Image (spheres, helix red, strand yellow):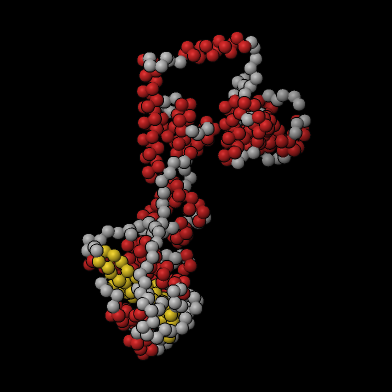
């Protein structure tokens, strides 16, 4: 195959870009394989006219190794690597790969030409250039190395403290920032990243961040909800704001920004054995309700504050996850539950046929409790003994409340805690969106359902 000038290659690429001819027809008219033409086009799209600048420097072993490392790291093919590194043919890269697989790094070294005396002279010159141990030059070199290490670790520590770990992108960024103070080759060796990886990220640094506005929006939603939202709920909130974003992209951006939702802890257990009548498990883990005030669940959870314990008794509507009402007390007495019932009954109408589910806590076994339900025409249901999954929705709410409220706030007193709890319940009902509620809050979903009906 004859060599083609720069002008001939550009004309062939122009014919393809005009859209009137295909790759195969152009290649046939030039008498070349169509894959060769594809390579010209890709290299031109990636590097511009510089792709065809001739280099008379032989490929070094380190360069070959960088190319192979890049392919392994990013999963690129020889064709793609040839484009990125401006190598005339992917066949050259395949040859390097075969040599490396058969004989290792030494196989990538170019065969030295000329007499061995030249090599000996070069080695002698290199030895003469190295400073003698203990000399002023050696001490200066050591000081410079220590300065570089100190500057590198300061920047790396700053990045790792924000994200929890240091990535190759972060290492490349640190090297890029220090490139005017210290030799890039030395910095790369110290950072233990390949030269190809560094220059790959340098190209990315110079590109505009297409997700800059989205990152600011995700950050603002996360802060608005005090870290309570994970990537799924943030995705739903973005949809509410007419931002169509895939949940995986939201997850990736949150990982880049170091944003994580909070974790959960266990709840208070009120089971004390059989102290009254055990009701059957009528609910049977069927947590779906067709309308409001059809199925409620309740339980008690415990908070530890200022060396004391506080107990919260809420009741939740399975239709939309709304907290109907709740009570707070310093002791888990029956009055905590009875007061909660009296407040919750005010939400019922004569048409409502309600099922109220709980665990086998001693409060719910008492005659007073069961009589109060019977008087209101409410059916009672209880979880099976030692089976928390039978009341999973209530368990889930307690985990969310502790994660999003208790562990994210500092309280000055018990009264301050109660004030903030009231604010959180109001937030949970009116503002906190849920995926299963089509991106609406519990109150919004109830209002929407009533409008449709």
- Residue 254 in view here: yes
Percent position of residue 291, x then y: 46, 79
Of residues 4 and 312, the one nearer the viewer is: 312
- Reply above or below: 344 against 304: below
The N terminus: image quadrant: top right
Count the labels in the image. Answer: 0
- Residue 10 in view here: no
Percent position of residue 133, x then y: 41, 16
> In which quadrant of the rendered view does residue 109 lie?
top right
> In which quadrant of the rendered view does residue 41 lie?
top right
Percent position of residue 162, x then y: 38, 45
| Residue sticking out furthest to the bottom | 375
Percent position of residue 98, x then y: 68, 32
Residue at left 35%, top 70%? 268
Residue at left 77%, top 34%? 28
Residue at left 52%, top 35%? 197
Residue at left 36%, top 55%? 223
Left or right: 5 in relation to 230: right
Of residues 451 and 260, the one nearer the viewer is: 260
- Reply above or below: 432 against 86: below
Left or right: 225 in relation to 288: left
| Residue sticking out furthest to the front | 273
């Amino acid at each position: 195959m004859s060599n083609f000038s720069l002008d001939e290659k550009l004309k062939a690429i122009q014919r393809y870009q005009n859209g009137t001819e295909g790759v195969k027809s152009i290649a046939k008219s030039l008498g070349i394989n169509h894959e060769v033409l594809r390579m010209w086009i890709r290299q031109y799209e990636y590097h511009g006219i510089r792709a065809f600048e001739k280099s008379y420097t032989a490929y070094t072993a380190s360069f070959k190794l960088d190319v192979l490392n890049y392919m392994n790291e990013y999963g690129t093919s020889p064709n793609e690597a040839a484009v990125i590194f401006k190598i005339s043919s992917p066949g050259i890269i395949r040859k390097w790969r075969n040599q490396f697989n058969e004989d290792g790094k030494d196989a990538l070294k170019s065969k030295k030409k000329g007499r061995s005396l030249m090599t000996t002279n070069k080695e002698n010159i290199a030895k003469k250039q190295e400073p003698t141990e203990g000399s002023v030059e050696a001490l200066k070199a050591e000081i410079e190395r220590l300065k570089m290490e100190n500057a590198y670790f300061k920047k790396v520590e700053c990045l790792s403290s924000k994200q929890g770990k240091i990535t190759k992108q972060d290492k490349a960024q640190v090297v890029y920032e220090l490139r005017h103070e210290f030799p890039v080759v030395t910095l790369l060796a110290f950072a233990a990243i390949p030269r190809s990886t560094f220059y790959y990220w340098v190209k990315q640094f110079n590109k505009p961040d297409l997700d800059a506005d989205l990152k600011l929006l995700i950050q603002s939603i996360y802060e608005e909800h005090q870290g309570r939202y994970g990537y799924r709920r943030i995705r739903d909130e973005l949809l509410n704001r007419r931002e169509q974003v895939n949940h995986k992209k939201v997850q990736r951006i949150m990982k880049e920004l170091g944003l994580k939702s909070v974790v959960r802890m266990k709840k208070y257990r009120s089971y004390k054995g059989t102290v009254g009548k055990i009701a059957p498990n009528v609910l049977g883990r069927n947590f779906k309700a067709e309308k409001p005030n059809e199925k409620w669940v309740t339980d008690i959870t415990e908070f530890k504050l200022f060396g004391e314990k506080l107990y919260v008794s809420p009741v939740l509507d399975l239709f939309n996850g709304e907290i109907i009402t709740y009570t707070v007390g310093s002791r888990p007495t029956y009055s905590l539950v009875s007061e909660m019932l009296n407040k919750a009954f005010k939400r019922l109408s004569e048409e409502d046929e309600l099922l109220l589910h709980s665990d086998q806590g001693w409060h719910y076994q008492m005659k007073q409790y069961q009589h109060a339900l019977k008087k209101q025409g409410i059916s009672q249901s209880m979880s099976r003994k030692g089976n928390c999954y039978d009341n999973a929705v209530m368990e889930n709410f307690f985990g969310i409340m502790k994660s999003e409220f208790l562990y994210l706030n500092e309280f000055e007193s018990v009264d301050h805690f109660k004030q903030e709890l009231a604010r959180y319940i109001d937030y949970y009902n009116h503002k906190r969106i849920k995926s299963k509620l089509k991106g609406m809050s519990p109150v919004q979903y109830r209002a929407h359902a009533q409008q449709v009906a």
